Image (cartoon, helix red, strand yellow):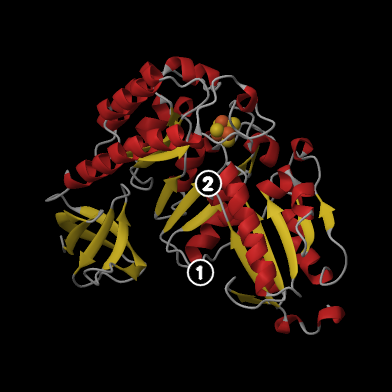
Amino acid sequence: MDRIGKAEMVRVAVATLGCKVNQCESAGIAEALVARGLTLVSCDEIADAYIINTCTVTGRTDYQSRQLIRRAIRKNPAAAVLVTGCYAQRAPEEIAKIPGVRFITGNTEKENIPDIICEMMVGAPRILVGNIRDQKKISRLGATVFPEHTRAFLKIQDGCDAFCSYCIVPHARGASRSLPLEEVLERITSITRAGYREVVLTGIHLGAWGRDLQPRADLVALIRQIADRHTAERIRLSSIEPRELNTELIALIGASKTVCRHLHIPLQSGDDGILSAMHRDYNAAFFRNLVWNLTSAVPRIAVGIDLMAGFPGETEEAFANTLRLVEEIPVAYLQVFPYSRRPGTPAATMAGQIPEPEKKRRAEQLRAVGAMKRQKFAEKFIGTPLSVLIEGRTDKKTGFPVGFSDNYIPVAVRGDGATANQIVRVMPEAFREGRLLAEVIHE
Ligand code: SF4
């Protein structure tokens, strides 16, 4: 620390792109830096060091990562800029060409960033990126405090072995690895003691949690333990693959008072030929049945889905199959991405690449369906009580505090007790501009 003076004088900013796993890890880095006595500042301020935690899931996130790096360098050309995350793991040499980047680490080496940052204030760019597919242990990077969030995120799983044909993530995150059960429970206890009411369990391939542990375990066993030991008031599962939602897990979610009635399930396409070319392990009929089973077994559940528009070979007919399936099934919202060609994946060299404007057009068409689905789902709850975790934000129009119901509907709440970090019962009265308007009720 001599080269840069007293630790507390060193100002570090952390910028993050991408998934909740990346956000968990950034929060862990920030927490470790503060523990070493460094001062955290926002990326809009002049800092002595910037840490850019990147994403590579699409060409656009690569571009946004480069933008964040360049913005940090412009903000303070004398600063030490460290780049990490999935884009750094996949293409370190590409990043090393950006003048002003001082250090590049892969995802495995992320854990060492708090130490590295103290040593890197001078010198030529250095790359520290290992072969992540060799990595057997999950990084313990995580946090107990999430300054800008009302809910906490806990990474319980990393990596993926599925190798969907469009996806670069298995190359950037390595093989599936799990945080052992006792550690998950300990971390949830710490997060809960820090005052969080809701913990989001995150992973790259969450449903694979426990497969690599000795003894082998699964999400059902984990959720039971969390509920039995009362370690958290509310837990929410982040994205989960269709095949991993087995009957036991669905029944458990239906019976649980701890697990939020919300699942995010990647569908990607409603056309069997496209699903097969994507190397997805289900077909449209399987997905249709799954959503109908889920919504009848778990009343009030919000099912959100991911869709990819314009995968190579997606004909008008294949796209129409997706539209038809989505219109038919009772889903609460859609997250739509135009297909992005990722070098190194099988889909990148497939015939039948769809022109960008057409991908965008299809994505817009799906998003319009998504907006209608969102409204229709929320309006079903007008006149039905909901439990809402209030966040530290207010609705711009009404000035009322806002939060999310356990089934993931944004709600603006009027009345006593609607203060940040409280779970309140509310009665929804109307749907306006993307959220329900509701009043606190005392049952
Ligand atoms: S399941 Fe498929 S889409 Fe998801 S991270 Fe793994 S390879 Fe990528």
Q: Residue at x 39, y 33 (%)?
A: 362
Position of the C terminus by quadrant = bottom left
Where is residue 159? Give x, y as percent: 64, 38
**Left of 395 or right of it: where is 86?**
right
Q: Classify 10 Å Cα crowding around label 1: few (below 14), some (14-19), many (20 and above).
A: few
Tag 2: amino acid: Thr
Q: Secondary structure at mark 1?
A: loop
Q: Which of the two residues, 376 or 26, is positioned nearer the viewer here?
A: 376
Tag 1: amino acid: Pro
Q: Classify 10 Å Cα crowding around label 2: few (below 14), some (14-19), many (20 and above).
A: many
**Distance from the alpha carbon under mark 1 to that under mark 2:** 18 Å
Where is residue 208? Give x, y as percent: 57, 33
In this rendering, does residue 332 appear at all? no
Q: Quadrant of residue 158?
A: top right
Q: Which mark is residue 147?
A: 1
Q: Quadrant of ligand 1?
A: top right
Q: Which mark is residue 202?
A: 2
In this rendering, does residue 340 appear at all? yes
Q: Residue at x 33, y 21 (%)?
A: 289
